[in-house]
Image (cartoon, rainbow, N blue to C red):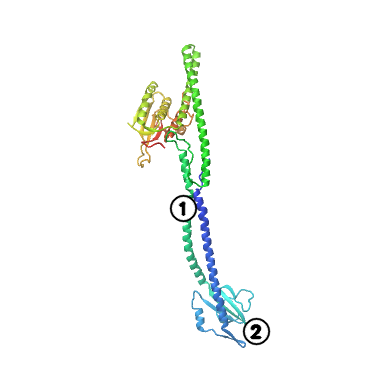
Amino acid sequence: MRQVPGVSLQRKLLLWLLLPQLVLWLSGGFLAWRVALQNGEKGIDQTLTQSVRALARQIKPIGDGLLVDFPKAAQDILEQDPTDRVTYMVSSPPGRFLLGNAQLPPPPPVTVQVGDPYLYHARLDGKAVRVALLDVDYGTPQSRQTLRVQVAQSLTVRERIAQELLEQMLLPMGLMGLALSAVVYAGVLRGLQPLKRLEAQIDRAGAPPQRSGDFALRPIELTSAPQEVYSLASTINRLLETVARAQQKEKRFLNDAAHQLRTPLAGLIGQTELALHESREPAVQDRLLKVLSAAQRSAHLVHQLLQLARSESTVEMQPLDLAALAREVAREWAARALAQGMDLGYEGEDALPVQGHPLLLREALNNLIDNALHYAGPGANVTVRAARMPAAPGDAPPARPWALLLVEDDGPGVPAEHLGDLFARFWRGSDKAGGCGLGLSIVEEIALRHGGETVAEPNGMRGLRVGLRLPLGDAPAA
C-alpha cells in the first residue's frame, strides 16, 4: 500500500502557533470593543445622573403646586445635537406628563426608590437611548405627592467613542500580531534547520561511495542539534550500523560460497571432459554431456555471483575513455559472434571521457554483449554503441551531461510489459539454456555504483536496446 505524505511539520507548527494567535487577537478585539462600550456607558450614566439631579433641583414646590425654573436656553442646549440628543420629561404623579418630551418611554415594571436615580435602556424614535429616572417627594405632610424627572441621552456617541477607541487599539495590536507572526515563522524555520541537516546527512549516508575506503552507509554526524534530533540521529545510526553489518555478512557469505564452489566445479568440468574423451558408449556420452552442461551452468552462476559481490563492494573511480573501452571489448567478442553466425560491430564516439572503474565497466559490457548474443539468435546484428545522450528537440539542455553505453540487437526482443523485469535477479526472458538471470542484475549494480542508471527499450520495430547511462566528463560519480 502506497503511503501518502501528510501535512509537513512546518505547516503544522505554523498552524498551531499562528491560529491560536489569530483567535486570541480577535477575542482581544471583541473584549476591547465590549470594554469600550462599558466605559462609554459609565460615562453616560454619570452625565445622566448629574443631569437628572440638576433638573430635579430646578423644580421647586410652592404650596400644593410646582415651580419649574428651567430656562428655554438650557432646554435648547440639551437638545441642540441631533446625533447625541438629550431629552427630558417631568411628570407628577409619575407617568402624568407635565413638561418636556411626552414620548419618553416609561421604565420597566420595577420598584423605584424615592431619591435614588434609576437608569435603564429604552428606544426613542427607533434609536437606542439611556434613561436616568429620579423620583422626588413634594407637597405638605398632609398631602404628599411624587414628582418624576427623566433625562434620556442617545447611545450614538457611546458607540462612536467605542469605535474610535477600538480603531486606536486595533492598529497597534495588528502591528504587534504581524511582528509576532514574523518572529514565530522565523523561529519555526530556524527550529527545523536541524531536521533539514539531518535529511541531508541521511541522503549522504545512503549515497554511493566516491572513492575506495568509503562506506555505503556512513553514520550521521551532527555537530550541534536539539536533544530530540540528536536522539533520532543516534537511532538512525544504530539502524545504519545494523544494516551495514547485515550487508557485510551477506557479501562475505556470497563471496566465500562462490570461492569455495569454483574449485570443485572446475574439477568436475575437467573430469567430465576427460570422461567424454575416454568413453565411446553413446548413452554414457549423452549423460556426461548433460553433466558437463549442468556443471558449466553452475560455474557460470558462481562467476556471476562473484561479479555481483564485487560490484556491490566499494571501488575506486578513475578517468577513462568509455568509447575506447567499448571498441576493445567489441573486438574481443567479434570471433565468438562470427562463430554463432552474428554480426558484431561498434558505432559511436571516438572518445568519451567518464569517471569509472575499468574492470567493472568491462564486466558490465561483457554481460550486455553475452546477453545479446545468447538471445538474439543466428543471423542477428549486434551493435555496441558509446555516445553522448542527445537532447530532445525543443528541450533545454540537460542540467548534467550523460554518456550512453548501449548494446543493440535486432533479435526477438522483450515484450514491453517485461522491460521493467530485465534487471531483476534470476529473471529470464526465455527458457533457453545457458543463462542464470544474473547478468543484467550485475549491470544494474555497476551502473548504480558509478552514479548512473540502466536503460532498456525496444530497438525500433524489432530487437532490444540495453545499456548504462553514466555521468559524462571528469566530474566524480555521485
**Residue behind mark 1:** 186
- The relative height of residue 369 versus residue 70 in the rendered view (above or below) is above
- The relative height of residue 33 versus residue 119 in the rendered view (above or below) is above
- The relative height of residue 363 versus residue 278 in the rendered view (above or below) is below
Decide: marks 2, 1 in contact (CB < 8 A)? no
- Rate crowding at label 1 as few (under 14), some (14 to 19) or many (20 or more) other CA atoms within 10 Å: few
Three-letter amino acid code of the residue under disc 2: Arg
State the SS at label 2: strand
Q: Which of the numbered marks, if any, corresponds to residue 144?
A: 2
Using the numbered discs, state the Cα–Cα distance from disc 2 to disc 1 in whole angstroms.
Answer: 77 Å
* Furthest-right residue in this view: 142
Residue 203: x %, y % from top left: 46, 40
- The relative height of residue 237 versus residue 89 in the rendered view (above or below) is above
Residue 284 visible at all: yes
The answer to which image quadrant residue 65 occupies is: bottom right
Q: Residue at x 66, y 85 (%)?
A: 143
Residue 208: x %, y % from top left: 44, 36
Residue 340: x %, y % from top left: 40, 22
Q: In front: mark 2 or mark 1?
A: 1
Which part of the image, by quadrant, shows the C terminus?
A: top left
* Furthest-bottom residue in this view: 63
* Furthest-left residue in this view: 350
- Front-most of residues 13 and 81: 13
User: Of callouts 2 and 1, which one flags the residue occurring earlier in the amino acid sequence?
Assistant: 2
Residue 154: x %, y % from top left: 53, 73
